[in-house]
Image (cartoon, rainbow, N blue to C red):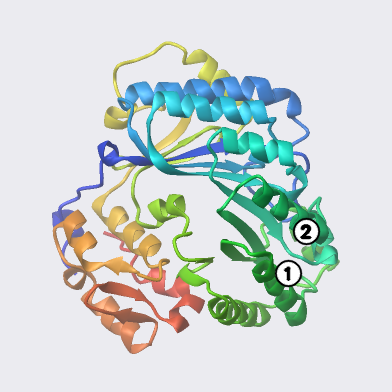
Amino acid sequence: MPKLAQIKHNPPSHENGIGLYVHIPFCQTKCSYCDFNTYERIEGHIPDYVTALTNEIEAWSDLLSQPVVHTVFLGGGTPSYLPVDKIKHILSTIHSSYQVYESAEITLECNPGDITLEGAYGWSEARVNRVSMGVQSFNDDLLGLLGRRHTATEAKQAFHTLRKAGFKNVSIDLIYGLPYQSASQWSDTLNEAVDLGSDHISLYSLQIEEGTPLAVDVNKGRYPTPDDDLAAEMYEEAQRKLTTNGFTQYEISNWAKPGMESQHNIIYWLNEPYLGVGAGAHSWLDGQRFFNLKSPTRYVTAMDKHRKRTNQSPVATMQTPFGPVEQVDVTTTAIDISETMMMGMRLNSGVSHKRFEKRFGTTLNEVFSKEMDRLATMDLIEITDEGVRLSDKGRLLGNEVFAEFISDQ
């Protein structure tokens, strides 16, 4: 491996376009497994938060000279919990402040219980063209265990409501490896997702995160510890069933009908620039990673203090946090290479020889020949003329593969 400090570090510029992530931290109730930056029962903060959010959107537009936006993703939290007029205001501000591609993918995450026909029409009027619905399971007992506030029937009704409102790109999230979840229950949930006519399906193995109510229940023996071997079997069952039913797996956790891949998430996996706005939102711009204050109230206060505009871009010289930004990390060559490999290897297409060489001025083989040879011998990766990618076996052992591409230089 050559000295990474000698390799040209040329992170992509925001001037070529960005993905825009908008964090909405509000939930009616927080699910038992969730450790995301979300808050329940603080609805009274919504007006001030949306004001601060739109101020931040406008401030970054000024600082980055109205960048081109390829994708917009409203995540959370539960964006669908906001009143429709607030969603419209946020997206209107984005469209008036940035150069949003006419064909830009604009995604709204939603809870099935929030979906009404009137609301769905309102999202469409706001130019949302993709909805990601957190179904998680089509089994009511398991939904109860997760603390979800919808039933399987309500989830299916919500999907049909979105179709009636004209949404042609609807994704659903499912979780496997749950306490008490059987292989047959998982198979039934997959069948329901396929029969529903979903355009995109994301599958996530349950992670027991310390500090969550579910972790407390597992640690106290109220629920059994999830079975990793059974979870692996569930993953393989999903691969078979979804492929048979017209879905293409394009990333470790994601399957799509042709042309329905998540363009916003592909920006992450290709390690391309994105801006995150809102409490706790993360960004990757011009060689720097940074994130905002997590607390919605602290975030609102910080944005209120930052009403004074500045002509100096914080991305270029961010020595101290700007406005709501809490921490900034300048990315080294070694970190950029490692992150490009770890994120890119999640894609079924893997890491492209051409993209890697264009970005770093050297080849994959020059940097990782020993690691790639070792992983290929173990049947964990495949090396092709186009690039390097995970094998079927490697997808089950992804973290072990990714660790090979982390450098301490």
Position in image of residue 253 (x %, y %): 53, 66
Question: In the rendered view of the protein, which quadrant contains the N terminus?
Answer: bottom left
Q: What amino acid does circle 1 point to?
A: Leu
Badge 2 marks a residue whose secondary structure is helix
Q: Which mark is residue 238?
A: none
Quarter of the figure with residue 19: top left
Q: Residue furthest top?
A: 308
Pointers 2 and 1 in contact (C-beta within 8 Å): yes
Residue with the mark numbered 2: 146
Q: Which mark is residue 178?
A: 1
Q: Residue at x 47, y 76 (%)?
A: 395
Q: What amino acid does circle 2 point to?
A: Leu
Quarter of the figure with residue 228: bottom right
Q: Nearer the viewer, residue 356 or 324?
A: 356
Residue 193 visible: yes
Q: Is residue 47 above or below residue 242?
A: above
